[in-house]
Image (cartoon, grey):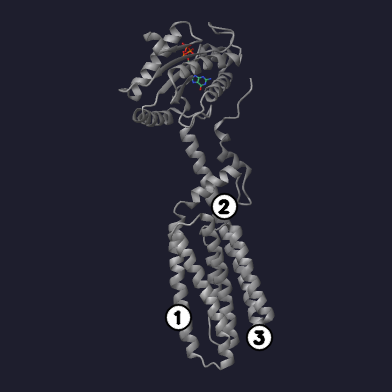
Amino acid sequence: MQQLPLLASSTQYAQQLRQGFRWLRFGPALEAEYRAYCSDNEYRRVLWFAAICLVLWAGYWLFDLWRIDAALLDARQRALLVPLRAVRAAGTAANLLVLGCALWRCPMRVLRATLTVMGVTFSCGAAFAVYVYKLLGVPHETTVLVVVMLGLFLPFAISLWAQLLVALLYLACVAALAWTAPLPEVAAQMWRLDVELALSALLFGLAAYWREYQRREQFLHRGDAHWLAMRDALTGLYNRRMFNHHIQQVMAQAQREGQPLALLLMDVDCFKSYNDSQGHLQGDAVLQQVAQVALACIGRPLDIAARVGGEEFAVLLYGSSADHARALGQSLVAGVRQRALPHGASTVAPVVTVSVGGAMLRPDDRAQTLYARADQMLYEAKNSGRDRCSWEEALQA
Ligand SMILES: Nc1nc2c(ncn2[C@@H]2O[C@H](COP(=O)(O)OP(=O)(O)OP(=O)(O)O)[C@@H](O)[C@H]2O)c(=O)[nH]1
């Protein structure tokens, strides 16, 4: 008999784990879920990051003003300070833009774009400042450039590939400054700096890759564990725990909104004798087939099909009229029969059959009372010959 691809190990998370994600990208659906997961709290984190950058940037700028004032510069040298100030102003503007975007919660792609612009203006701006100091002979620290490179790889909203792109632009900017430097000793220092920065980019990039890889791996393990906690491993349907949780919520909503709610319980007939004659593994395959029939009969967002016991399934239909629910009960019975799964040991038919009991929600119902009535109807279906659907309204009529 055909096995269905619904086993626990085949959750989309587990599949992705097996396939791997060397390029830090999942399939489209999982990628979208991962991004939504990452953007939780992202605005707050970026806000803090941008605020800290602004304080550091302003502090560095003030320190520089004092330092340049202290240096004795002639008019030609002072002319070099004009582009430096322009670059600084651009960095501050980009920083404020990020702050504003995070504060007013602009769409995530706008936030990412502004963060990328801030990365470019900060890194190229810092490189240009160091270059100008070298030309002016003003004492300065080059480690700030390495710190900026480290900042580019911090995990804030933008992807590792965008971070790498900004880092490459940064390296190209330092190379361009080295290339065009009018003084040979400044050119040599800038080239050396570029090599140091390239090495640090490699190091920080690798660290960022592993961090992102592990974050993705954790996301998949968490998703897999969550999926397994809610699902039945054999059939992939919701498990009893999830069913209990869901029925409470859907009942409350149905009672609040005056919507009908139907509960169908389905049980495989003579399943013990099937297991005894065909073996447990074949029995498992039957349960998977029956689960498929249950799954096929739900369609609305609040409907669920669950495996609530060994060979017992529940189908909860929200907003479904009694007539529609009864018809679905019949189609569950017919659907399993149509699968024509041979059952030589059955006392009912030569194929696997199911019995179904159904009940509609009443205004004063609790989950237990609704379940008990549907269970009573299932008992009724079993007692009146199996391979049928019993409905509580039919009993009352
Ligand atoms: N293969 C398999 N069998 C299971 C699983 N869970 C429960 N069962 C079996 O389901 C059978 C249920 O048997 P019973 O409760 O006696 O019911 P039945 O034989 O179907 O009889 P009726 O329901 O009265 O028609 C038992 O033999 C259990 O071992 C499972 O996950 N896989």
- Mark 3 Cα shell of 10 Å, populated few (<14), some (14-19), many (≥20): few
Distance between the alpha carbons at the discs numbered 2 and 1: 39 Å
- What residue is shown with label 2? 213
- Residue 303 picture location, percent across and down: 47, 28
Sequence-first disc among 2 and 3: 3
SS class of the residue under badge 3?
helix
Foreground residue among 79 and 210: 79
- Mark 2 Cα shell of 10 Å, populated few (<14), some (14-19), many (≥20): some
Callout 3 amino acid: Glu
Callout 1 amino acid: Leu
Location of residue 187 (image quadrant): bottom right
SS class of the residue under badge 2?
helix
Instruction: Tell me the tag on residue 185.
Output: 3
- What residue is shown with label 1? 62
Q: Mark 3, mark 1: which one is toward the viewer?
A: 1
- Residue 396 picture location, percent across and down: 36, 9
Distance between the alpha carbons at the discs numbered 3 and 1: 28 Å
Sequence-first disc among 2 and 1: 1
Q: Quadrant of the N terminus?
A: top right
Sequence-first disc among 3 and 1: 1
Callout 2 amino acid: Tyr
Please say whether residue 117 is visible from this viewpoint: yes
**Residue at 66 percent of width and 75 percent of height:** 175
- Mark 1 Cα shell of 10 Å, populated few (<14), some (14-19), many (≥20): few
**Residue at 62 percent of width and 45 percent of height:** 20
